[in-house]
Amino acid sequence: MCGIVGFIGGEQAAPVLLDGLRRLEYRGYDSAGLAVFGEQQGLQLVKAKGRLAVLSDLVDGGAKLEGTVGVGHTRWATHGEPSDANSHPHLSNSGRIAVVHNGIIENYMEIKEYLQSQGVVFHSDTDTEVVAQLLDYYYQGDLVEATFKVLHRIEGSYALGILCSDHPGQLIAARKDSPLVLGYGEGCNFLASDVTALIKYTKTVSYMEDGELAILTRDGIQVYDALLQPVEKERSTVDWDIADAEKGGYEHFMFKEIMEQPEAVRKAIAPHIQNGQVVLDGLGLDADFLQSLSRLYIVACGSSYHVGVVGKYQLEQLLRKPVEVVLASEFRYSNPLVDENSLVIVISQSGETLDTMAALREARRLGAKTLAIVNVVGSSIAKEADYVLYTWAGPEIAVATTKAYSTQLAVLMLFGIWTARLLGRLTPEREAELLGEMLRIPDKIAEILRHTEEIQYYASLYFNHESIFFMGRNLDYAMGLEGSLKLKEISYIHSEAYAAGELKHGTISLIEDGTLVVALASYAPLFDKDVSNVVEVKSRGARVLGLTTRSRAEEMAKHADSLIVIPDTDLMFLPSLAIVPLQLFAYYVALMRGCDIDKPRNLAKSVTVE
Ligand code: F6R
């Protein structure tokens, strides 16, 4: 995925665009570019492979580009390698029209071949360039008309920003399956992939819907539907601040976001807990439907999928109904056994992960009801699901998720407890007890975060290992999956998570002198079995970093070489605590290995390709 931004107003556009791109860099960071129109210099295009800093240096922080209207882009390559030529904006051959794009034009090859047969020469390997060249092809003085024709000709997903030197008083935006936000300023207006890019300038926004086209001028924004009929957009006010999208004194966004978890989890749960009961007013699901369910599915990707793995253990205990947890990329092609008696819960921080979106559509097509647990308000997944629960984690900028993961866990648990009551599976006393403990979780996370130096020390012992295993049973296994993903994605250490009982069915042959095993042993009912597994791997030469609760620390300390201790809690909430030291461990290991923590190689914050 990529980040796009557009500005039209009275001040110099390039510094504003660069500032917006800086905040969108988490969406992609292999190249970046700007197109700005100035009265003196006309349409100026600058693009460069590499981080945004390279582009910024080229244009002296924007000072070199004259003009008050422009578009910018930060790229995560899909079609064509990262290079200057493949960077956006793409310019049409007439030199008149510049285009930035997020998404994928699926029929670009066919259009490209057609245009080539008409003599159009292409200068990049991207799918996006066809939009610029096709605009030129259709353009006869009316940019909106040409855009309208292009939108009918292209297939796939897009958020587009279009600037034409014949019409410097306007910017055009269009959206299908890729997020696009419009920002309303005073004497200026904005478009962006994400509100973080424009929050410094305005908090009044509206979210474009699929099929909409917008014309931005200095004085206003007019939106049209797919038939070019004017649409009155609802405006909303963003309820978080620029400080939330800045590092606030921390060296990395990831560390800041780890530290924000107590507050984020509190914000996610507190409004839904009243008088010892979960309140999900306005969700719209009713007891009869929940009662009729034969099965629940949790469908997601990456860390959000790992939340689902935790959720399977928890929800099956609470509801005594089968819960299938499926990777979204597998679900969509597996002819799933989903029908009108299924509830499909999709989990997505960004709300724009393509596989999750496709799985959601497939579930709806098969007649299931869908519930989305999403962080980004107004995102595609939130819009298309039948029911939505927001996680309210605020902007998450680091590519590796931390606070969004923790709030997803919390919201899924809220949903589980609420449903269990409606199904008559939870006594009021047990519900009040669970929720009492849930409200203490933010403080317990804060307690763990007061001892970061201990985790830092363990990271210093183990950061030079090249292969690390995580093992645990039940919820500890689910935690291991996420702990392992955190570590590998930012530190580039090979790591695998195993259900501890499974290790001896093959993987134990990889354990040799000095191999690091992170042994998760917080789930009390299986603690003795965890200890046996620790003994097993130690007798093969492993070094063991253990993790357990305070009440079992003494016993675990007899077996592990190093030990992380978390506060005691109800079994249901162990994952909310256990994940925090694992996030910190991954962070410090990556720091000690000199990795680019917020922007790990080859990754982007949300994945809008298959
Ligand atoms: C890992 C990470 C990814 C995402 C995955 C799904 O730290 O962030 O694994 O969890 O790409 O993204 P969303 O939740 O936006 O659908």
Image: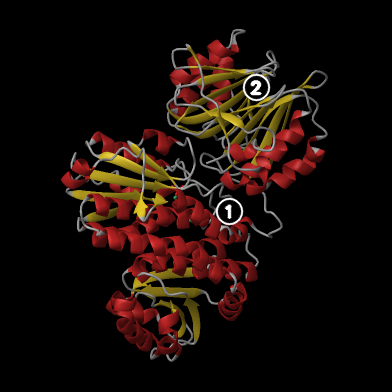
Q: Position of residue 118 (x, y in %)?
A: 52, 16
Q: Residue at x 54, y 17 (%)?
A: 147
The earlier-in-sequence mark between 2 and 1 is 2
141 vs 546, left or right, is right
4 to 375, vertically: above or below: above
Q: Is mark 2 within 8 Å of ligand 1?
A: no
Percent position (x, y) of residue 406?
Answer: 46, 58
Q: Residue at x 68, y 59 (%)?
A: 250
Q: Nearer the viewer, residue 416 or 397?
A: 416
- Secondary structure under badge 2? strand
> Which residue in the protein does label 2 denote?
163
Instruction: Say few, some or many: other residues with alpha carbon within 10 Å of mark 1 (under 14 / 14 to 19 / 20 or more).
Output: many
Does residue 226 appear in the picture of this structure?
Answer: yes
From the top left corner, tell me how far across and down residue 294 is, in percent: 16, 48
Relative to 405, is 89 above or below?
Answer: above
Q: Is residue 153 left or right of residue 325?
A: right
The number of numbered badges drawn on the structure is 2
Residue that numbered label 1 is attached to: 398
Check disc 2: other Cα within 10 Å, few if <14, some if 14-19, many if 20+. many
In which quadrant is the C terminus drawn? top left
